[in-house]
Image: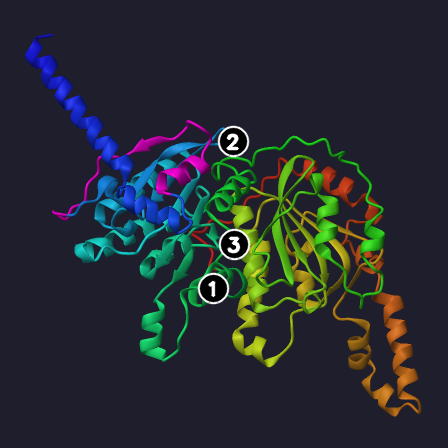
Amino acid sequence: MPDDTLAWMNELTADMEERRKRAQRGGGPERVKRQHDAGKLTARERLDALLDDGTFVELGAFVEPNERGLDAPGEGVVTGYGEIDGRRVFVFSQDFTVLGGSLGKMHAAKICRVMDLAARGGFPIVGLNDSAGARIQEGVDALSGYGEVFARNANYSGVVPQVSAVLGPCAGGAVYSPALTDFVLMSRSSGTMFITGPDVVKAVTKQTVSVQELGGADVHARLSGVAHLVEDDDRTVLARVRELLAYLPSSARGQPPRRTTRDPDDRRLPQLATIVHPDPQRAYPMREVIVAVVDDGRFLEIQPEFARNIVVGFAHLGGRAVGIVANDPRQLAGTLTIDASDKAARFVRTCDAFNVPVVTFVDVTGFLPGVAQEHGGIIRHGAKMLYAYAEATVPKLTVIVRKSYGGAYLAMSSRDMGADVVLAWPTAAVAVMGADGAANVLHKREIEKSSDPAATRARFVEDYRREFDHPFKAAGRGYIDDVIDPADTRAHLVRHLAMLEGKREERPFRKHGNVPL
């Protein structure tokens, strides 16, 4: 090769490496220090913590802003792919040290590029959000960029898992991309989400509120339900992302990965008889029932602080990933509410989208009565649960632990709503309503006319309990497949999951259903 050609190639190579290093430096040492002082990792440090060592491959390192004069190395976002536990994932990590991680047209184009590649190849998308919002200098181009990201969030929903980690500010239009994904995880120390900030809220409503009070992680975990999981800092959030993906397939075309366990499939659970009291008026910790049943006692609860009367989360049974839905009798007696219905319906639909069987533990007296619930739309929201279970084609197993009354019996995955196998403990009861309410409705006149109304009512209550407050009436009609010893619950579930492993279910042609939103 001639000397002048070699010199020219060396010059181009040096320029390329300098540009690459510039992108890797982000906003420079001072801004990196500010990021660390705020308790946050940089965009690249987050990718190092999320991905298996040495697996990250960067794409688009040389992309620059459309707007001239803006100094934005890497366009303020690091994109590419890597591996988590040996499985490929596509990632983007917004760089707050570069123009506050603000989104411009080319910033969005980098994100869209990896989203498209992930969808085509059938791999999860993980977004690490830390951004001041739309780049004002780019005007409508920035808004267009958000639109392109949102459209992909929607179009790839149910195609590949989409997980968002909110590790810094996420405001205005930026909040809708995480909200459109399957799971939102937030850092308690630095993650915030809101449509309008405290200053705008004060100007419009005269209310004074802090950033954390308005859109902090705990607010979204407990009140709004936006956050599915909250951890203390960047590293623990990213560790939780890794754990979450272990329950999900790479795409809707695949099956969740199996997990090796030494936990015997037929392990007996005598402790369940002491956890669950046979008195239907006595509350008990449903989470302890779940932990006792699943492999190695490992249960990843989703939205644990939101709508606590319903419990949802992931576990394994016999090495197979499952989604768990259960009533919690310690919270509002396990009744179904507006928020609980939304929480359960969304979770069931997520499991169905990604081929995760659903196991439902039932102890429910009904939907919560009251003016606030009725006016808030409990009919519309409760219908979401009915729709979700009826729509789901994954294996569905139901265990009736104690009460299963009224419309809530149907909403908690009954045989009629498509449950493949329904099991019941001897403590179970399936009826239109509880004995006390039934006696008042069926024998109101006799009780009122009786010389001893209390004794007459007690007799009718006892008669109703003897007739209906057990599982054998429903089992006799074929609504329950088996009444089992609680100690054998795990063995039955593992056996039935194995039987249903090849389940296929055809549905009538349609463009899509119309879930009651």
Q: Distance between the residues labelled 3 and 1?
A: 19 Å
Question: Which element type, helix, strand or loop, lies under badge 3?
Answer: loop
Q: How far apart are marks 1 and 2 (CA)?
A: 36 Å
Q: Name the amino acid, label 1.
A: Leu
Q: Who comes first in sequence, dot 2 or dot 3? A: 2
Q: Name the amino acid, label 3.
A: His
Q: Name the residue under label 1.
A: 517
Q: Who comes first in sequence, dot 1 or dot 2? A: 2
The reply, left or right, for residue 367 in relation to residue 139 is right
Q: Name the residue under label 2.
A: 85
Horizontal and vertical percent position of residue 214: 43, 67
Up/down of 52 relative to 93, above or below? above
Name the image quarter holding residue 308: bottom right
Decide which of 256, 309 is in the foreground and name it: 309
Up/down of 359 relative to 7, above or below? below
Few, some or many residues within 10 Å of mark 1 (<14, 14–19, 20+) = few
| Stretch of the chain drawn in magenta | 42-69
Q: Do the residues labelled 2 and 3 touch (CB within 8 Å)?
A: no
Horizontal and vertical percent position of residue 264: 76, 33
Q: Name the residue under label 3.
A: 228
Question: Which element type, helix, strand or loop, lies under badge 2?
Answer: loop
Up/down of 434 relative to 190, above or below? below
Question: Which element type, helix, strand or loop, lies under badge 1?
Answer: loop
Residue farthest toward the left in the current orientation of the protein: 4
